[in-house]
Image (spheres, helix red, strand yellow):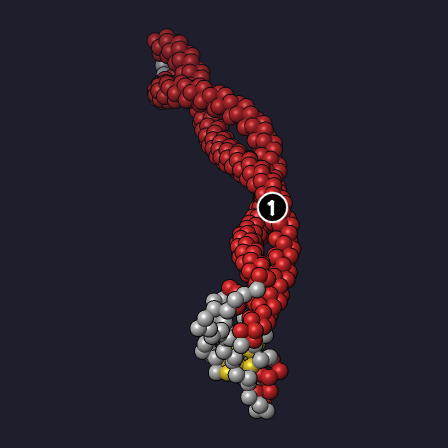
């Protein structure tokens, strides 16, 4: 039934399909309009009124008239005695039977065609759904490909940056290796200098010990020389005292006799001997004093040399500490640069791995896209086939409907002829 709304009511027009396939009986005719209250489901038998056509239904709802009554189906009264029928009635019945059989066959064909059409429509809907799904898959694949290309570009940029960083790290490493080589050579030279300084220190210590021993021996010799000088001074003083005493004796004995002259001669010899002894003591004293001065000068020079050696040793120790600090700094810098190069190598390997994964993902996405494109083409071809089949089915269904219309017209004409023949037979019997 074709439904429409008018003034809050539902109008349902009866079609020939409703009569032949709806199972509503013979109480209704094609073109009648059933009037239902608002909110009710259109169902024959539950209508509030029935009109012959749409104009009568709208006029009824406008309040200008009443719908036509539903005519009861015409029923034939059985005669008490069967009337003789003309021979043409048998042929007419056979024609009607054949027409009914043809109508039933057409109905079966139409039902099969409708089922086929419904199946084609279902397949078309499934194909449309598959096409939509394939389109969605293709869009998703395109999106994944774009993302994969973007990730691949990012991975390539990261790879280039990591490669550049690795190259810079290699250059820095080579430069640091050169610096380390220079520092190693400097360290070797410093160690050689330290060894030389150590040997010089040992030699200085040995010389210092020797000088200290010489100083001790010089001190002993100086003490002995001073003792000898004191003894020589004492002997000189004693000699001078004896000389003075001898001179006094000489002066006192100058007026004596020959005995005194001989004594004077003896005293003069003794004075000469004492003078020689005095000269000898003076020379020894002067030699001892010179020796003492030489020992003092040697001690001063030795003390100065010891001070210089100590200053040189302190400078050597400071230089060694400075070189050791520089060597430790170079080793720490080399370790830091080596760890940086290792970390850059790990980052480069990770970037290469990510780039490989991105390339694999891009390849998989491309394969998925190709597969989805093939599925989409297949779905489109299947959809075109189904659309063609559906159009053919619709055309065939239209042809079947036209045949049904012609059959119904023929049946109506046959019914009119039969009714007229029956009326003529009844009139003839009367």
At a point 40% along the width and 13% down the height, the residue shown is: 277
Which image quadrant for residue 60?
A: bottom right
Does dot 1 land on a helix, a strand or a loop?
helix
Which image quadrant for residue 59?
A: bottom right
Q: Position of residue 156 (x, y in %)?
A: 61, 39
Q: For the image shown, how many numbered marks are present on the structure? A: 1
In depth, the one of 200 and 242 nearer the eye is 200
At a point 62% along the width and 63% down the height, the residue shown is: 410
Compared with residue 294, is residue 165 higher up or lower down, i.e. above or below?
below
Which image quadrant for residue 53?
A: bottom right
Compared with residue 403, is residue 231 higher up or lower down, i.e. above or below?
above
Report if residue 257 is visible in the image: no
Left or right of 331, for residue 95: right
Q: Position of residue 200 (x, y in %)?
A: 47, 21
Q: Residues within 10 Å of mark 1 (few under 14, many from 20)?
A: some
Residue identified by numbered label 1: 382
């Amino acid at each position: 039934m074709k439904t429409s709304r008018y003034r809050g009511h539902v109008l349902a027009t009866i079609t020939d399909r409703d009569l032949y396939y709806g199972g509503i009986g013979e109480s209704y005719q094609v073109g009648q309009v059933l009037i239902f209250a608002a909110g009710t489901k259109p169902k024959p038998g539950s209508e509030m009124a029935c009109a012959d056509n749409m104009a009568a239904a709208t006029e009824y709802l406008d309040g200008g008239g009443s719908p036509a009554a539903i005519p009861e189906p015409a029923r034939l009264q059985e005669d008490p005695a069967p009337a003789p029928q003309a021979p043409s009635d048998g042929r007419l019945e056979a024609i009607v039977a054949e027409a009914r059989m043809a109508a039933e066959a057409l109905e079966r064909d139409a039902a099969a065609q409708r089922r086929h059409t419904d199946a084609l429509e279902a397949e078309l809907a499934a194909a449309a759904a598959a096409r939509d799904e394939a389109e969605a898959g293709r869009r998703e694949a395109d999106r994944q490909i774009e993302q994969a290309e973007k990730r691949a570009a990012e991975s390539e940029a990261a790879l280039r940056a990591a490669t550049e960083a690795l190259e810079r790290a290699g250059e820095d490493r080579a430069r640091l290796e050169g610096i380390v080589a220079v520092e190693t050579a400097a360290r070797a030279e410093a160690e050689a200098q330290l060894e030389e300084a150590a040997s010089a220190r040992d030699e200085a210590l040995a010389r210092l010990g020797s000088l200290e021993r010489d100083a001790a021996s010089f001190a002993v010799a100086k003490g002995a020389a001073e003792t000898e000088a004191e003894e020589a001074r004492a002997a000189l003083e004693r000699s001078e005292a004896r000389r003075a005493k001898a001179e006094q004796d000489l002066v006192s004995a100058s007026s004596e006799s020959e005995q005194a002259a001989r004594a004077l001669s003896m005293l003069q010899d003794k004075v000469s001997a004492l003078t020689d002894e005095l000269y000898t003591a003076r020379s020894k004293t002067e030699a001892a004093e010179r020796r003492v001065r030489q020992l003092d000068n040697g001690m001063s020079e030795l003390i100065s040399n010891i001070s210089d050696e100590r200053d040189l040793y302190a400078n050597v120790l400071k230089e060694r500490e400075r070189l050791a600090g520089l060597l430790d700094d170079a080793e720490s810098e080399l370790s830091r640069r080596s760890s940086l190069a290792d970390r850059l190598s790990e980052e480069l390997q990770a970037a290469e791995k990510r780039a490989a994964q991105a390339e694999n993902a891009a390849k998989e996405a491309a394969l998925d896209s190709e597969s989805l494109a093939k599925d989409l083409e297949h779905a489109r071809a299947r959809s075109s086939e189904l659309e063609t089949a559906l159009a053919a089915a619709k055309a065939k269904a239209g042809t079947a409907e036209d045949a049904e219309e012609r059959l119904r017209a023929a049946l109506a004409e046959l019914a009119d002829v039969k009714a007229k023949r029956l009326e003529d037979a009844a009139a003839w019997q009367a």
